[in-house]
Amino acid sequence: MPDADALTCEQAQARLMGLPAGATVLLLGGTDTGKTTFALAAATALAQAGRSVALLDGDLGQSEIGPPGTVAAALAAPGGPDPIRSGRDLETLAAYFVGATSPARHLLETAVGLCQMARVAKKRRPALLLADTAGWVQGPAARQLARRLAELLLPQTVLAFARGDEVDPLLSVFAHLKSPEVRRVTPAEGVVRKSPAVRATRRAARFAAALEGASEITLRLDDVALWGTELGQGEPLPHHLQQFVAGSLGVPVLYAARPTGGRLYVVVDGGRWNAGGLAAIEGHFQVRATTIVPAERFAGLLVGLVSDRGALLDVGLIARLDFARRALTLHTPCRRPAAIAQVWCGSVRLRPDGLELGQIKPGEL
């Protein structure tokens, strides 16, 4: 089991100083327990000692390095800002788009993002890699994520920031293991819990900053691949069959196609349709299931713009979808539209000022 005696932040920082070059440290803990504050203070101290530190930011909702909804990596090097007050003071190395503000429904994407960013950071040969995570510690899925991150990142040390016993269930995944070393850390004085309203306001400001200087660009759907939606998959239905679907549902149909797997995918203009018409549609097309998506779910959707090498170029919002012209208009600060090969759909809908309009559940697009 993990050590019962909690370290102070000063003691934990001293332990980092003694780790071998290239070591990885995983930071776990609940919301507002000071993980990020500790990571920045430790990076400052190590940089002052002439050692570079790579910071991985896996807190999707309260990101310090990349935009909210991304996992990002940055480098703190000797001669940089002193002290380091924010992840934005550092050299950003790369970011990975998850498109959500919580890892709860996005375990795989979050784990892959942190693993990818660790690979990017290690190319710079930092003396230490600090992997910060979201403040999600309750439930089986949180334990699953912590365990898989440890397996992927192979940390020498896990520092668990906690008030009381809130991380005990999370740390049970490391019981009876010789590695990694697991130590509890008492949050520093002055670290206080923020209200949900304060966190939402801060997140909106970070979204707005990520979209600053945005303009509209239009991409042809035939020139890019869409990820995270069935839109664009399979063969679109001819106009007369699309009209048959519209008549059966009693709502205008903007797009209809037959993806693989014996299914039908339909985008409708409106939030209500005749559910009784589904049987006629599925019988006519001999499909097992039909996915019906109101077009409004795409409005303001957060997207990641990815190059042909898989690198995140920038983020943006869906401004319009023109199904007749097969065109996608985005609100984005991206200045390299010709480099966009894929558009990854997230699960958050936003206004251009960063205010959240709602969440999209997996499978709803």
Image (spheres, rainbow, N blue to C red):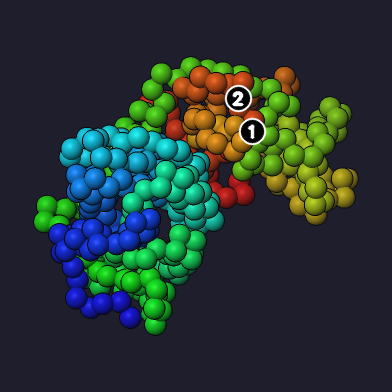
Q: Position of residue 320 (x, y in %)?
A: 58, 23
Quadrant where the N terminus sits is bottom left
Is disc 1 placed on a helix, strand or loop?
loop
- Would you place residue 220 above or below residue 158 in this image? above
CA gap, disc 1 to disc 2? Answer: 7 Å
Q: Residues within 10 Å of mark 2 (few under 14, many from 20)?
A: some
Whether residue 222 sits left or right of residue 287 in the image: it is left
Query: Hey, which quadrant is residue 93 in on the image?
Result: top left
The residue under the point 64% across, 33% down is 308
Which residue extends farthest left? 189
Front residue (pair 252, 65)? 65
Q: Which residue is depicted at the point 22% across and 40% down?
A: 84
The numbered mark, 1 or 2, whose residue comes first in the sequence reads: 1
Left or right: 252 in relation to 90? right
- Residue drawn at x 26%, y 54% is 35
Q: Residue 346: where, in percent of width, then height?
A: 53, 41
Circle 2: element type: helix
Q: Determine if residue 59 is in view.
A: no
Instruction: Residue type at mark 1: give it.
Output: Asp
Task: Find out whether the residues at labels 1 and 2 contact each other: C-beta distance under 8 Å.
Answer: yes
Label 1: which residue? 308
Q: What is the number of the mark on residue 339?
A: 2
Q: Is residue 81 above or below residue 112?
A: above
Which residue is at the front of the view, 271 or 318?
Answer: 318
Amino acid type, residue under disc 2 in the picture: Ala
The local crowd at label 1, few if under 14, some if 14 to 19, many if 20 or more residues have their Cα within 10 Å, is few
Residue 250's place in the image compared with 175, above or below, is above
Task: Return the x and y of residue 209 as percentages of the image width and height.
Answer: 35, 28
